[in-house]
Amino acid sequence: MSTSLPLYCPSLTAYVRRTTIPVRIGELEMGSHVPIRIQSMTTTNTMDTDATIAQSIRMIEAGCELVRITAPSIREAKNLEFIRKGLRDRGFTAPLVADIHYTPNAAEVAARIVEKVRINPGNYVDKKQFAVLEYTDEEYSSELQRIRDKFVPLVRICKEYGTAMRIGTNHGSLSDRIMSRYGDSPTGMVESALEFLRIANDEGFHSIVLSMKSSNPLVMVAAYRLLVSRLQAEGLPAYPLHLGVTEAGDGEDGRVKSAVGIGTLLEDGLGDTVRVSLTEEPEAELPVARALVLRYNEPRQPLERSIGPDLPYSPTSYRRRITRSVATFGGDFAPRVIADLSHEPVTNMAQLEACGHVYDAETDKWTSTDQAADYLYVGTSPLPFMAPGGTRQIVDARVWAVMDEPFYSIPLFAVDEFWAAERRHTVINIVRVRTDELTTETIARLQQHDNVVLWLYTDHQHGMTDIRAGMIALMQAGCQHPAIIERTYAGYRAEDEITLWAATDVGGLLVDGMGDAIVLRGMERLDDANRLSFGILQAARTRMTKTEYISCPSCGRTLFDLQETTALIRKHTDHLKGIKIGIMGCIVNGPGEMADADYGYVGSGPERITLYRGQEIVRRNIPTANALDELIAIMKEDGAWIDR
């Protein structure tokens, strides 16, 4: 598969930020000529003026450059004036953004008060019914005229008042009209925004920021890339991009999922403002956003290689790189996790608990968790005992060559060692290759050996891009050897930094279908590296080993305590491997934003919850006190529940 789309990013071999038009938002400028901005959203009731002001101040003091506030009706939109005045009176000048869903009249009020309005094209005019509709071309054109009639008044107000606008498509809230023609897809997301963008363009209004958000990082990344290509193809201005993964969740999972989506696009040079959506206090989002962004403030050396304009894969639709199976690497096997035990010898079985393998001395048996490492890299110190069942140790080739029983261990060769080796494994040989060693000649020689797995690593500052270039070289040469991704993180100051950088570097490759195994090296704790490895695979939707929670970050529309409720649901369901549960504070972030969830828990009124199976309502307006029990009952009905 190759792509002939206009290139979605300025360079595939260097960090070059996409050039955009400038957009002014109050006193703040946004675009490629200024640093990437970070922002967040209040969780208070917009009608509680004092609480919203106080929380906004905490956000600003934590580094928030734009403060977004929900305005679900005219009443809240009007109250933005008092919130804005309260902040200005206290000396805070950060621009305010009104978040609008369903209510054009509220947007028109807010646009006269705050510096920016955000509209969702999926529900600004349309009222989504989750209906399957068929439109003739004439009916479709009539719908577009209806959108124009509703949208133009807001555009003209924004022009008059100097108000900026974000046209923000959400994956799960596409209109029935878009769904009927394009499906629930990145293409549909882009077209949904373009419908509104073309109208604004016709009106000569360009103070616009665009977003393509999804709770699925693969969908989100594909949509942004496709959007950039479509803007180029249609000759539309290069508008700044707002990056975010919706409903990322909390804790490490939320940070990893956010980094897989946001970090991948930042690596591509895309993105002018970032919001990390965590089910935590908004102040907690800002250090995460800052850590993601700061990585791109320092210049990086470009790669000394070129990649042609025709890619051997599509960056806008996921397809895993085609590889042959070697042992349990590649082919139809899910990506493997390799635990790095090479920094110190393993002397007892208890040490393997950190990578998911637990030994019971009384029964003399191993048990493995759902997140147990598939392979153990021991370097020059083979295990002094038999590896856990189903697991193999990887041993440096020079040590492997003199082992008494080498068959049940796997040799790791350097490239030159492999050429010179007198003894190789009959089933699997792993060859560790630095990316600059992947010459045409080397790839051709490696292709003569069917039982080889490549272990790719790089010393280049632009690590993810360098490994991606190596993968592209393999694909262009028709090489189908499985490939292990190695990234080393030693000496970094903050735990969050390692988490976010690893999720970016490895996740950015996985979302493009590249990588058959991962090994994270240099981390202080083996259990952290193991957990993070599986977390990255889960966030990239390439290997599901735990329950996934698609939980919104809360806002003034939320009808229950999201953090407390998410923790409660997690406590009772975190053993349901592979199940996706959406936890949404209100109907705005309800069935839409949990588009690919298996089950949904959605606030529908004070102390009332509506439960979903996929997109289907199965219990409506039940008391909050009973909601979790009802959710578990639905899972049991479906055979999706298992006891611990």
Image (spheres, helix red, strand yellow):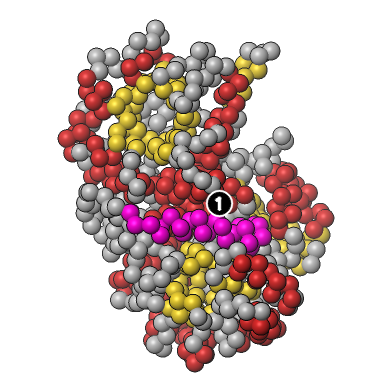
Residue 595 left/right relative to 272: right
Residue 627 left/right relative to 418: right
Name the residue rendered at 34%, 49% in the picture.
462
- The secondary element bearing badge 1 is classed as helix
Q: Mark 1 points at which residue?
A: 255
Residue 342 left/right relative to 419: right
Q: Residue furthest bottom?
A: 160
Q: Position of residue 529 (x, y in %)?
A: 52, 36
**Does the rendering let one see residue 409?**
yes
- Does residue 340 sit above or below 294 in this rendering? above
**Does the rendering let one see residue 172?**
no
Q: Where is residue 278 in the image (x, y as percent from the top left)?
A: 61, 57
Q: Where is residue 279 in the image (x, y as percent from the top left)?
A: 64, 57
Front residue of this view, candidates 498 and 543: 498
Name the residue rendered at 58%, 88% in the picture.
112
Front residue of this view, candidates 92 and 213: 92
- Does residue 365 sit above or below 184 in this rendering? above
Front residue of this view, candidates 263 and 448: 263
Residue 635 left/right relative to 158: right
Q: Which residue lies furthest to the left in this view?
A: 441
Name the residue rendered at 52%, 90% in the picture.
161
Q: Is residue 456 magenta?
A: no
Q: Residue furthest top?
A: 404
Q: In which quarter of the image is the C terminus?
A: top right
Dividing the picture into quadrants, the one containing residue 571 is top right
What stretch of residues is rendered in magenta?
277-300
Front residue of this view, candidates 390 and 242: 242
Name the residue rendered at 63%, 74% in the picture.
69
Q: How crowded is mark 1: few (under 14 residues within 10 Å), some or many (20 or more)?
A: many
Q: What residue type is labelled 1?
A: Arg
